[in-house]
Amino acid sequence: MTGAPPTTSPSQVPVGVDPNRPSIARIYDGFLGGKDHYEVDRAVMHKINEAVPEAVDIAKGNRGFLNRACRFLAGQSSIEQYLDCGSGLPTAENTHQIVQRSNPDARVVYVDNDPVVLAHGRALLEENENVHMVEADIFTPSAVLTNETVRRHIDFSQPLVLLHVGTLHHFEGDGGPDVMREYIDALAPGSYVVFSHFYDPQVPELTALAKRIEEILVHGPMGAGRFRTKDEILAMLPGLEIVKPNATTGPDLVACDEWWPDGPRLTPLSKAARCIAGIVARKP
Ligand code: SAM
């Protein structure tokens, strides 16, 4: 992000938002080119850009992965229900727009706890009767799984697509596998999980880059943003079968940009783009 992005005026600040505290959702959206960020968010974005100028590739790679994974599952599975945890601010292409293109009857429940996401989400995302926005803490799975709106629109006896894209790296500590296990236990066989996470590929120059961003996120006002290793990430998907991530015979875990890209790469992947991993996995 360069230059001075437009500022959201105080009259547009949704109720309950503290514009003095940076928000994951607004910073991420800012990297994707969105406009709903405040001075505190821009200060964090500026620090990240100074430390890693190509950091924007992490956000873009992540969102591109989410879009392709949704298109893939909507086109190739017969699943009609999607639970999108930590859905973020409405952006150019949202889960329901992608999946309803293949199946207009597909149901999508978005879950987030950021007041700006909830305000904008309700205004912009709930555009048809099959799309709903829920406020809940996604790191307390029981709060999501027992939520009345979630239960009304998602039938857990049938396969569903659970999205946890760009979320668990904001969960501190080593409880991520327990959080995800609780979600996975609630899924019917044949369900899919779409998952992405900040990735430390354990290659010295990439680990160094990851640490530079982690330092800003974890030790700054955000307080969270961990780059985890392959083993740490795979431990969050217990009992799932990973869908082959591309046409090569390479590893199960790849950078988001390498997950079934739309075509051959015309330019090399940046180092930052290698530091976010994307996985689609199926519950047998
Ligand atoms: N999933 C979207 C994507 O990948 O494009 C957005 C990812 S954004 C980096 C992370 C989102 O998770 C933000 O919208 C943030 O508000 C939400 N989030 C973080 N912690 C949360 C929590 N405890 N409960 C609900 N949502 C949370």
Image (cartoon, rainbow, N blue to C red):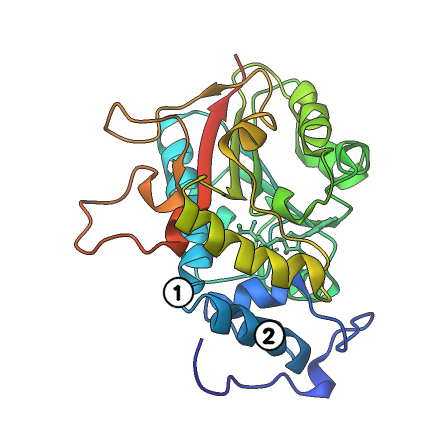
Q: Nearer the viewer, residue 39 or 269?
A: 269
Q: Which residue is farthest front?
A: 204
x, y (%) of residue 239? 58, 15
Name the front one of labels 2 and 1. 1
Q: Secondary structure at mark 1?
A: loop
What kind of element bears circle 2? loop
What numbered label is drawn on residue 54?
A: 1
Is there any visible trace of residue 93 in the rendered image?
no
Is residue 114 positioned above or below 143 on the image? below
Q: Is 34 drawn above or below residue 223 in the view shown?
A: below
Q: Nearer the viewer, residue 200 or 91?
A: 200
Q: Quadrant of residue 165?
A: top right
Residue 181 pos. (x, y %): 68, 24
The quarter in which the N terminus is drawn is bottom left
- In this rendering, would 263 be left or right of 204? left
Query: Quarter-wise, where is residue 214 in the image?
Result: bottom right
Q: Which residue is mark 2?
A: 36
> Percent from the top left, x then y, of residue 151?
74, 32
Badge 1 amino acid: Glu
